[in-house]
Image (spheres, rainbow, N blue to C red):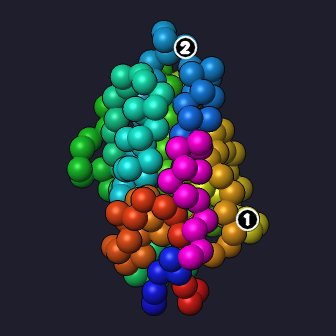
Protein backbone atom coordinates (compact mmCIF):
# COMPACT_ATOMS: atom_id res chain seq x y z
CA UNK A 1 0.00 0.00 0.00
CA UNK A 2 1.39 3.34 -0.99
CA UNK A 3 0.49 6.94 -0.62
CA UNK A 4 -0.86 8.35 -3.85
CA UNK A 5 1.08 11.54 -3.37
CA UNK A 6 -0.58 13.15 -6.34
CA UNK A 7 -4.06 12.58 -5.05
CA UNK A 8 -4.39 15.31 -2.52
CA UNK A 9 -7.94 15.48 -1.26
CA UNK A 10 -7.41 18.52 0.96
CA UNK A 11 -4.22 20.56 0.86
CA UNK A 12 -2.80 22.41 3.86
CA UNK A 13 -4.37 25.51 2.41
CA UNK A 14 -7.80 23.85 2.08
CA UNK A 15 -7.52 22.63 5.67
CA UNK A 16 -6.65 26.13 6.88
CA UNK A 17 -9.72 27.50 5.07
CA UNK A 18 -11.89 24.87 6.77
CA UNK A 19 -10.46 25.81 10.16
CA UNK A 20 -11.19 29.50 9.64
CA UNK A 21 -14.74 28.86 8.48
CA UNK A 22 -15.44 26.45 11.35
CA UNK A 23 -13.96 28.85 13.90
CA UNK A 24 -16.28 31.59 12.66
CA UNK A 25 -19.28 29.28 12.94
CA UNK A 26 -18.26 28.31 16.48
CA UNK A 27 -17.93 31.97 17.48
CA UNK A 28 -21.49 32.53 16.30
CA UNK A 29 -22.89 29.37 17.89
CA UNK A 30 -21.50 29.88 21.39
CA UNK A 31 -21.54 32.99 23.55
CA UNK A 32 -18.79 33.78 26.05
CA UNK A 33 -21.19 32.82 28.86
CA UNK A 34 -21.69 29.31 27.52
CA UNK A 35 -20.05 26.60 29.55
CA UNK A 36 -18.46 24.77 26.60
CA UNK A 37 -16.43 21.59 26.96
CA UNK A 38 -14.75 19.98 23.97
CA UNK A 39 -14.60 16.20 23.83
CA UNK A 40 -12.10 15.01 21.27
CA UNK A 41 -12.01 11.52 19.82
CA UNK A 42 -8.53 10.04 19.81
CA UNK A 43 -6.31 9.60 18.00
CA UNK A 44 -7.55 10.91 14.68
CA UNK A 45 -9.07 14.22 15.81
CA UNK A 46 -6.25 15.38 18.09
CA UNK A 47 -4.51 17.60 15.58
CA UNK A 48 -7.71 18.97 14.08
CA UNK A 49 -9.07 19.83 17.54
CA UNK A 50 -5.87 21.56 18.63
CA UNK A 51 -5.71 23.68 15.46
CA UNK A 52 -9.42 24.44 15.55
CA UNK A 53 -9.44 25.67 19.13
CA UNK A 54 -6.39 27.79 18.44
CA UNK A 55 -8.16 29.29 15.44
CA UNK A 56 -11.33 29.79 17.51
CA UNK A 57 -9.14 31.61 20.03
CA UNK A 58 -11.18 30.60 23.01
CA UNK A 59 -9.98 28.85 26.14
CA UNK A 60 -12.18 25.82 26.58
CA UNK A 61 -11.37 22.64 28.46
CA UNK A 62 -10.46 19.67 26.28
CA UNK A 63 -11.23 16.11 27.21
CA UNK A 64 -10.46 12.98 25.31
CA UNK A 65 -12.23 9.75 24.56
CA UNK A 66 -10.78 6.86 22.66
CA UNK A 67 -13.26 5.23 20.31
CA UNK A 68 -11.95 2.37 18.27
CA UNK A 69 -13.64 0.33 15.62
CA UNK A 70 -11.10 -0.03 12.87
CA UNK A 71 -8.17 -2.14 13.94
CA UNK A 72 -5.86 -2.38 10.96
CA UNK A 73 -8.64 -2.65 8.48
CA UNK A 74 -10.11 0.05 6.29
CA UNK A 75 -13.66 -1.09 6.95
CA UNK A 76 -15.53 -0.51 10.18
CA UNK A 77 -15.60 -3.68 12.27
CA UNK A 78 -19.10 -2.65 13.33
CA UNK A 79 -18.11 -2.76 16.99
CA UNK A 80 -17.14 0.43 18.73
CA UNK A 81 -15.11 0.33 21.90
CA UNK A 82 -14.97 3.46 24.04
CA UNK A 83 -12.35 4.11 26.70
CA UNK A 84 -11.91 7.14 28.91
CA UNK A 85 -8.77 5.91 30.62
CA UNK A 86 -6.53 8.69 29.28
CA UNK A 87 -8.35 11.29 31.27
CA UNK A 88 -11.67 11.04 33.02
CA UNK A 89 -14.48 13.18 31.80
CA UNK A 90 -15.62 16.00 34.08
CA UNK A 91 -19.17 16.31 35.36
CA UNK A 92 -20.99 17.19 32.14
CA UNK A 93 -24.30 18.12 33.77
CA UNK A 94 -25.52 21.38 32.24
CA UNK A 95 -22.41 21.81 30.10
CA UNK A 96 -22.48 22.40 26.35
CA UNK A 97 -20.48 19.60 24.77
CA UNK A 98 -18.71 20.08 21.48
CA UNK A 99 -17.84 16.63 20.18
CA UNK A 100 -14.90 16.78 17.79
CA UNK A 101 -13.98 13.94 15.44
CA UNK A 102 -11.95 13.49 12.30
CA UNK A 103 -14.34 11.71 9.94
CA UNK A 104 -17.96 10.60 9.67
CA UNK A 105 -17.88 7.36 7.73
CA UNK A 106 -20.44 4.73 8.73
CA UNK A 107 -21.52 6.83 11.72
CA UNK A 108 -21.19 3.90 14.11
CA UNK A 109 -18.48 5.63 16.11
CA UNK A 110 -20.38 8.89 16.50
CA UNK A 111 -23.59 7.02 17.34
CA UNK A 112 -21.83 5.03 20.07
CA UNK A 113 -20.17 8.12 21.54
CA UNK A 114 -23.39 10.18 21.47
CA UNK A 115 -25.21 7.31 23.21
CA UNK A 116 -22.44 7.21 25.80
CA UNK A 117 -22.53 10.96 26.46
CA UNK A 118 -26.30 11.58 26.47
CA UNK A 119 -26.96 9.99 29.90
CA UNK A 120 -24.29 12.27 31.42
CA UNK A 121 -26.87 15.04 30.97
CA UNK A 122 -25.02 17.82 29.19
CA UNK A 123 -27.13 20.86 28.26
CA UNK A 124 -26.56 19.97 24.64
CA UNK A 125 -24.15 18.12 22.37
CA UNK A 126 -23.02 19.51 19.05
CA UNK A 127 -20.86 17.63 16.57
CA UNK A 128 -17.87 19.17 14.82
CA UNK A 129 -16.38 16.85 12.22
CA UNK A 130 -13.52 17.60 9.86
CA UNK A 131 -14.58 15.25 7.05
CA UNK A 132 -17.71 13.48 5.92
CA UNK A 133 -17.62 10.67 3.39
CA UNK A 134 -20.09 10.86 0.55
CA UNK A 135 -21.80 7.50 0.83
CA UNK A 136 -24.99 6.77 2.73
CA UNK A 137 -24.12 6.28 6.37
CA UNK A 138 -25.20 3.20 8.33
CA UNK A 139 -26.15 5.57 11.16
CA UNK A 140 -27.42 9.03 10.29
CA UNK A 141 -25.85 11.58 12.62
CA UNK A 142 -26.60 15.31 12.67
CA UNK A 143 -23.36 17.17 11.99
CA UNK A 144 -23.51 20.73 13.30
CA UNK A 145 -20.12 21.92 12.03
CA UNK A 146 -18.54 20.21 9.02
CA UNK A 147 -15.15 20.87 7.46
CA UNK A 148 -15.49 19.19 4.08
CA UNK A 149 -17.07 16.30 2.23
CA UNK A 150 -14.67 13.76 0.71
CA UNK A 151 -15.07 10.88 -1.76
CA UNK A 152 -15.69 7.36 -0.49
CA UNK A 153 -12.05 6.41 -0.44
CA UNK A 154 -9.71 5.84 2.47
CA UNK A 155 -7.93 9.06 3.34
CA UNK A 156 -4.92 9.67 5.56
CA UNK A 157 -2.92 12.60 6.88
CA UNK A 158 -3.58 15.52 9.21
CA UNK A 159 -4.22 13.08 12.06
CA UNK A 160 -5.95 10.36 10.09
CA UNK A 161 -4.05 7.10 9.90
CA UNK A 162 -3.93 3.77 8.22
CA UNK A 163 -2.73 1.17 10.76
CA UNK A 164 -0.99 3.88 12.77
CA UNK A 165 0.81 5.38 9.78
CA UNK A 166 0.62 8.65 7.85
CA UNK A 167 -0.95 10.71 10.63
CA UNK A 168 1.85 13.26 10.47
CA UNK A 169 1.27 14.24 6.83
CA UNK A 170 0.22 17.88 6.52
CA UNK A 171 -2.18 17.30 3.62
CA UNK A 172 -5.07 14.86 3.51
CA UNK A 173 -4.41 12.37 0.75
CA UNK A 174 -6.06 9.31 -0.68
CA UNK A 175 -4.52 5.98 0.22
CA UNK A 176 -3.71 4.18 -3.02
CA UNK A 177 -4.98 0.70 -3.77
CA UNK A 178 -8.18 0.85 -1.74
P1 LIG B 1 -17.32 5.29 11.43
O1 LIG B 1 -17.63 4.69 12.78
O2 LIG B 1 -17.36 4.30 10.32
O3 LIG B 1 -18.09 6.55 11.12
O4 LIG B 1 -15.81 5.65 11.46
C1 LIG B 1 -15.33 6.68 12.11
C2 LIG B 1 -13.90 6.45 12.48
O5 LIG B 1 -13.20 5.55 11.61
C3 LIG B 1 -13.23 7.76 12.35
O6 LIG B 1 -13.27 8.45 13.58
C4 LIG B 1 -11.84 7.39 11.91
O7 LIG B 1 -11.05 7.20 13.04
C5 LIG B 1 -11.97 6.09 11.17
N1 LIG B 1 -12.02 6.27 9.71
C6 LIG B 1 -13.10 6.17 8.90
N2 LIG B 1 -12.78 6.42 7.63
C7 LIG B 1 -11.47 6.72 7.62
C8 LIG B 1 -10.55 7.10 6.57
O8 LIG B 1 -10.86 7.25 5.37
N3 LIG B 1 -9.27 7.33 6.97
C9 LIG B 1 -8.86 7.20 8.26
N4 LIG B 1 -9.69 6.86 9.26
C10 LIG B 1 -10.98 6.62 8.94
MG1 LIG C 1 -11.74 8.23 14.94
* Magenta-drawn segment: 6-18
Under tag 2, what secondary structure? loop
Q: Which quadrant of the view contains residue 135?
A: bottom right
**Disc sitting over residue 22 in the figure:** none
Q: Which residue is mark 1?
A: 134
**Magenta stretch holds residue 14:** yes
Which of the two discs, 2 and 1, labels the residue nearer the N terminus? 2
Q: In this rendering, is residue 165 above or below 115? A: below
Residue 7 in picture, x, y percent from top left: 59, 74
Residue 20 in picture, x, y percent from top left: 56, 35
* 126 left or right of 36 in image: right
Under tag 1, what secondary structure? loop
Mark yes or no: residue 61 visible.
Answer: yes
Between 164 and 158, which is closer to the camera in this rendering? 158
Residue at point 38% right, 50% down? 47
* 160 left or right of 126 in image: left
Residue 161 in picture, x, y percent from top left: 41, 69
Between 106 and 160, which is closer to the camera in this rendering? 160
Return the residue found at the far top: 33
Q: Which residue is mark 2?
A: 31
**Magenta stretch holds residue 166:** no
Residue at point 36% right, 58% down? 43
Return the residue found at the far left: 86
Residue at point 57% right, 68% down? 8
Q: For the residue carrying disc 2, how many other residues have a C-alpha within 10 Å: few (<14), some (14-19), or many (20+)?
A: few
Locate the C terminus by quadrant: bottom right
Amino acid sequence: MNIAATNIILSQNDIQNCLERLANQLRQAYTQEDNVVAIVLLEGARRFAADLIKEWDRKIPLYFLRAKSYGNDVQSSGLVEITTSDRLLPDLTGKRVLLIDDIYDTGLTLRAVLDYLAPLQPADIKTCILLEKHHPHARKIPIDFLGATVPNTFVVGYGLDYAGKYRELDDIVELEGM
